[in-house]
């Protein structure tokens, strides 16, 4: 976000850094609150809210951020995006753990996570710069919104994990002994 605010919106590097610092500080404080909310209402509602918010909010928020001229406006838009993202970041580790029984959890969580991060997280800056260099920077916003739409399909079809037993012993089964 700091690079984006500096390179695209034209904020000074110090102002862009200040916006990033303030936004991330508030974002950190939101994590336990959203986690507690998911304990009350469930994980799926937060994930679905994140999916809808990301799918519908990415393009307008990023477009508006490109034209900001003040720290206040940049902070407000950045926080709007981060509040949406909190629906994922605050609970994603719990959801991933709750989706898999303990005997396959490490593989079930780690392999898809590593593949997705390599394909999408690791290439995000390159994809964004490709769109920018092609003169179609907003194409990246649509790419992100499309990825959010795919995630939304997953969230709407997954089971609720809030009350999932995390081990066989919690479900009343035997805990497998090492061979």
Image (cartoon, rainbow, N blue to C red):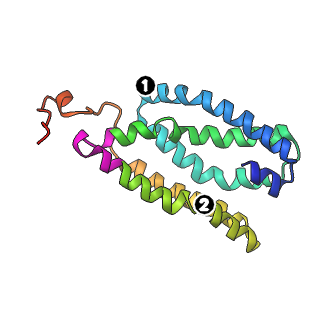
Secondary element under disc 1, as helix, strand or loop, is helix
Residue 167 vertical placement versus 36 (above, below): below
Q: Which mark is residue 111?
A: none
Left or right side of 103 for 33: right
Q: Disc count in the image?
A: 2
**First reached walking from the N terminus: tag 2 or tag 1:** 1
Magenta-colored span: 98-109
Instruction: Determine if the magenta segment contains residue 104.
Output: yes
Residue 151 locus on image (x, y percent): 47, 53
- In the depicted view, which residue is nearer to us: 54 or 11? 11
Which quadrant of the view contains residue 30? Answer: top right
Q: Residues within 10 Å of mark 2 (few under 14, many from 20)?
A: some
- In the depicted view, which residue is nearer to us: 47 or 74? 74
Q: Which mark is residue 40?
A: 1
Residue 74 vertical placement versus 129 (above, below): above
Instruction: Determine if the magenta segment contains residue 163.
Output: no
Question: Which residue is rendered at x = 29% and y = 33% of the image?
Answer: 164
Residue 61 vertical placement versus 139 (above, below): above
Left or right side of 79 for 111: left
- Front: mark 2 or 1: 2
Residue, disc 2: 124
Question: Which residue is rendered at x = 39% and y = 39% of the image?
Answer: 95
Residue 35 locus on image (x, y percent): 48, 29
Question: Which residue is rendered at x = 43% and y = 39% of the image?
Answer: 93
Q: Give how far apart the Cα atoms at labels 2 and 1 are.
A: 34 Å
Which quadrant of the view contains residue 19? Answer: top right
Quadrant for the C terminus in the image: top left
């Amino acid at each position: 976000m700091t690079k984006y605010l500096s390179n695209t919106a034209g904020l000074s590097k110090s102002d862009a850094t200040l916006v990033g610092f303030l936004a991330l500080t508030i974002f950190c404080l939101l994590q336990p609150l959203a986690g507690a909310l998911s304990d009350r209402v469930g994980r799926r509602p937060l994930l679905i809210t994140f999916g809808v918010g990301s799918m519908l909010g990415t393009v307008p928020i990023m477009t508006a951020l490109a034209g900001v001229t003040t720290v206040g406006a940049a902070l407000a838009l950045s926080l709007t995006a981060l509040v949406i993202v909190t629906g994922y970041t605050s609970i994603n580790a719990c959801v991933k753990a709750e989706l898999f029984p303990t005997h396959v959890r490490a593989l079930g969580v780690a392999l898809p996570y590593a593949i997705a991060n390599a394909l999408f997280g690791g290439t995000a800056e390159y994809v964004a710069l490709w769109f920018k260099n092609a003169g179609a920077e907003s194409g990246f916003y649509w790419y992100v919104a499309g990825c959010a739409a795919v995630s939304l399909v997953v969230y709407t079809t997954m089971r609720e994990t809030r009350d999932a037993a995390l081990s066989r012993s919690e479900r009343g089964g035997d805990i497998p002994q090492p061979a």
